[in-house]
Image (tube, rainbow, N blue to C red):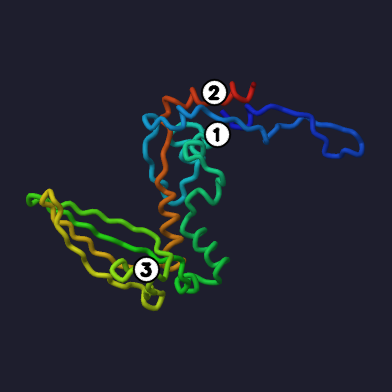
Amino acid sequence: MQYFEQFPSILYSFDPANGSFQLVTNIFARVKFLDSIISNTVIYYPYSVQDGDTAWSIADKYYDDPQRHWIVYFAQQLVDPYFDWPLTQNDLDNNIVAKYGSIANAQATLDHIEQQQKTTVTLNGVITTNWSNTSLNSAFTYDFSRQQVQAVTLPSIGTPLIDKGTITYSTPDGSVVSTHTQWVAVDVYTATISRNEAKRQIRLIDKAYVKVIEDQLTTLLAQ
């Protein structure tokens, strides 16, 4: 089913001066699907977008109809089908060059600073490891022992990593918790690649539910 086939038509004048009207598709019509459909995790399954994949090619491959590309977009709740979709490496590089002049300039420009932590918990001989990354935006920290704000040295493109060391402590249940912290400067090129890669992990609606969604779109637009 083509997406805009179901949209209502309206009379529209491209030349108001002569009073002529044409019947056109009202592409500004909007509908809201049932939250129960959007939030029902049972109907989705994960898919990793490969370089060159498009919503059309995925719809053709999985739903046997490239016109169902809108269902691929709908499952992600995408607003911008171009920039919210993972770009190919070539398109990504071209966008970076257009914005920063060159890949080298992007690699020499600071995007953000991350606090990366590796936490290891040992309990009864069993070791569990977790990693966490958070943005670090402040050049100051609060020293609780002195009850004062202190300036800190942040990493930069020239010095991209500052090791903050490891803190180890025991908990009442006998666990030994060890947390290693480092601050890392992330350049624009690396950050842009990482964000684009994250967009590759999408979800697809199980084909068994596609007809239900199409029927609901038709019903909502007819109201």
Q: Which residue is mark 3?
A: 141
160 sits left or right of 24 in the view: left
**At 51% from the left edge and 36% from the top edge, which residue is drawn?**
74
**At 48% from the left edge and 72% from the top edge, which residue is drawn?**
109
Q: Nearer the viewer, residue 125 or 221?
A: 125
Q: CA distance from mark 3 to mark 2?
A: 53 Å
Question: From this viewpoint, which residue is outermost toward the front?
Answer: 147
**At 36% from the left edge and 77% from the top edge, which residue is drawn?**
159
Question: From this viewpoint, which residue is outermost toward the left?
Answer: 124
Q: Which residue is mark 2?
A: 216
In front: label 3 or label 1: 3
Q: Quadrant of residue 116?
A: bottom left
Q: On the rendered image, what quadrant is the C terminus found in?
A: top right
Q: Which residue is mark 1?
A: 67
CB-based contact (under 8 Å), mark 3 and mark 1: no
Residue 166 lies, in percent from the top left, at 21, 66
Q: Quadrant of residue 11?
A: top right
Residue 106 lies, in percent from the top left, at 48, 70
